[in-house]
Image (spheres, rainbow, N blue to C red):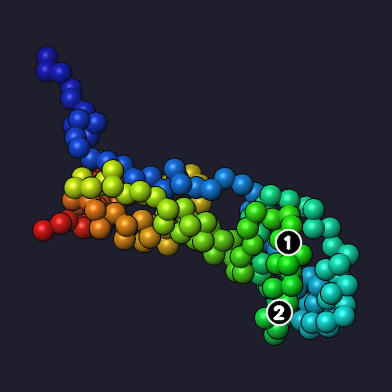
């Protein structure tokens, strides 16, 4: 009987798994419409008082996305003022959705990586993940990998989709 050989394990393929670069920590979306008059109008005095009365300690060591889910016209300084209140507590504050937050966290992490270990190697950009990996993180990763790798594929070793091959 012939021995079964795992050709994938024996190959030179390197797996680039974006989950490995997930920044751990609690994510919170903070909707400023809760402090708008009738959820639509910002009254400066009341807005400032609401921020003053808010318990900011609940955001200790959290990653916070400041957003406004109401269809309201809110001055630019409003979210900036919220960020000022969050600064002593939150690890990071961004303007936008939780997806925007995740994109920024991955962008910061991926730009600081040393990609030299992937030089002239065939790479598989792992597709499935249990953690939230935004589409933009894949775009950032492939841009960096394309600069050094021999080839880049997406998916799993058994069913990878070719994306790039150096000529």
28 relative position to 126: left or right:
right
The mark found on residue 86 in the picture is 1
- Residue at point 57%, 45% (across, down): 24
Query: Can you say whether 90 is above or below 17 in the image?
Result: below
Find numbered disc 1 in the image and state the secondary structure of the residue it sits on. helix
Which label's residue is closer to the chain start, 2 or 1? 2
Find numbered disc 2 in the image and state the secondary structure of the residue it sits on. helix
Q: Residues within 10 Å of mark 2 (few under 14, many from 20)?
A: few
Query: Can you say whether 94 is above or below 6 in the image?
Result: below
Q: In x, y percent, where is residue 9?
A: 24, 31
Q: Most extreme residue toward the top, as rendered?
A: 1
59 relative position to 112: left or right:
right
The residues tagged by marks 2 and 1 sit, at their Cα atoms, a distance apart of: 14 Å
Query: Can you say whether 115 is above or below 102 in the image?
Result: above
The answer to whether residue 122 shows anywhere in this view is no
Residue 33 placement: quadrant: bottom right
- Residue at point 46%, 59% (across, down): 107
The mark found on residue 69 in the picture is none
Q: Residues within 10 Å of mark 1 (few under 14, many from 20)?
A: many
**On-image quarter of the C terminus:** bottom left
The reply to whether discs 2 and 1 touch (Cβ–Cβ < 8 Å) is no
**On-image quarter of the N terminus:** top left
Q: In x, y percent, where is residue 139?
A: 36, 61
- Residue at point 23%, 40% (across, down): 13
The mark found on residue 77 in the picture is 2
3 relative position to 29: left or right:
left
The answer to whether residue 111 shows anywhere in this view is yes
Q: In x, y percent, where is residue 143?
A: 31, 60
Q: In x, y percent, where is residue 157?
A: 26, 41
- Residue at point 54%, 64% (across, down): 100
């Amino acid at each position: 009987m012939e021995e079964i050989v795992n050709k994938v394990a024996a190959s030179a393929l390197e797996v680039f798994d974006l989950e490995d670069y997930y920044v751990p920590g609690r994510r919170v979306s903070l909707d400023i419409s809760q402090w708008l008059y009738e959820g639509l109008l910002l009254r400066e005095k009341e807005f400032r008082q609401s921020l003053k009365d808010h318990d900011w300690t609940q955001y200790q060591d959290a990653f916070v996305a400041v957003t406004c889910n109401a269809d309201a016209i809110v001055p630019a300084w409003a979210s900036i003022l919220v960020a000022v209140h969050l600064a002593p507590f939150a690890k990071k504050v961004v303007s936008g959705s939780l997806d925007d937050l995740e994109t920024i966290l991955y962008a910061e992490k991926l730009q600081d990586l040393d990609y030299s270990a992937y030089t002239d190697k065939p790479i598989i950009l792992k597709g499935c993940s249990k953690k939230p990996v935004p589409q933009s993180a894949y775009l950032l990763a492939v841009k960096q990998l394309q600069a050094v790798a021999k080839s880049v594929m997406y998916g799993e070793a058994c069913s990878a989709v070719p994306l790039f091959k150096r000529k």
